[in-house]
Amino acid sequence: MTQKAVFYHAGCTICLDAERQIAHALDPSRYAVEIVHLGADRSRIPEAEAAGVVSVPALVIGGAPLHINFGASLSDVKGVA
Amino acid sequence: MTQKAVFYHAGCTICLDAERQIAHALDPSRYAVEIVHLGADRSRIPEAEAAGVVSVPALVIGGAPLHINFGASLSDVKGVA
């Protein structure tokens, strides 16, 4: 039985490093990790906001947002055309 | 073959939440996670600093520090008698 974890990023170097180090390090027998690029899939931004994400990269796991280092604020991601 | 990952914290609520959500979520077949309470084991502070840790909670994995949310700066931890 796996629970869902969502890793939100915006394609920046800090995001990709965190993705490599954390998102792919979770136990696959317990967590199904979805990687969401908010720059490429802007329709997911409201969902990230609703989960409490204020900057990327962030991992939402167990319903709580974990902000990992700092790549960009969500408002910056929203401001990018 | 597991690689070492070290989770540094200082006992605060933010630290303990992150420990529960991240440190224990890593794949145990790939990562041997050590939990270090820098408030209780102050002799490990220089090692954390050398790894690039500037605040807790932080996870050092693959040689790089990931700062997860923000509980306290390392200088605050050092300042606590």
Image (spheres, coloured by chain):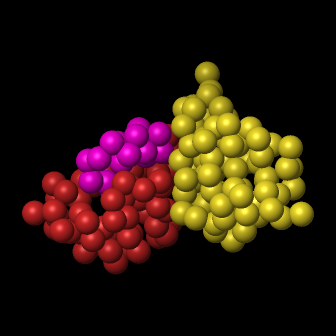
Chain colours: A red, B yellow
- Depth check, front residue: A80 or B5: A80
Res A16 → quadrant:
top left
Q: Identify the residue at horizontal 47%, vertical 54% (top origin).
A: A69
Res A46 → quadrant:
bottom left
Q: Identify the residue at horizontal 24%, vertical 63% (top origin).
A: A77
Residue A36 as seen in the image, left or right of residue A7 = left
Q: Residue furthest right?
A: B81
Q: Is A11 included in the stretch rendered in magenta?
A: yes
Could you say where residue B9 lies in the image, as x and y percent from the top left? 71, 56
Q: Which residues are magenta?
A: A3-23
Q: Does the image show residue B68?
A: yes
Q: Does the image show residue B17?
A: no
Quarter of the image where the C terminus of chain A is located: bottom left
Q: Residue furthest top?
A: B1
Could you say where residue B5 lies in the image, as x and y percent from the top left? 64, 37
Could you say where residue A80 lies in the image, as x and y percent from the top left? 16, 62
Q: Identify the residue at horizontal 57%, vertical 32% (top origin).
A: B63
User: Does residue B49 lie above or below A62 as drawn?
Assistant: above
Q: Residue furthest left?
A: A81
Residue A11 as seen in the image, left or right of residue A55 = left
Residue B4 as seen in the image, left or right of residue A3 = right
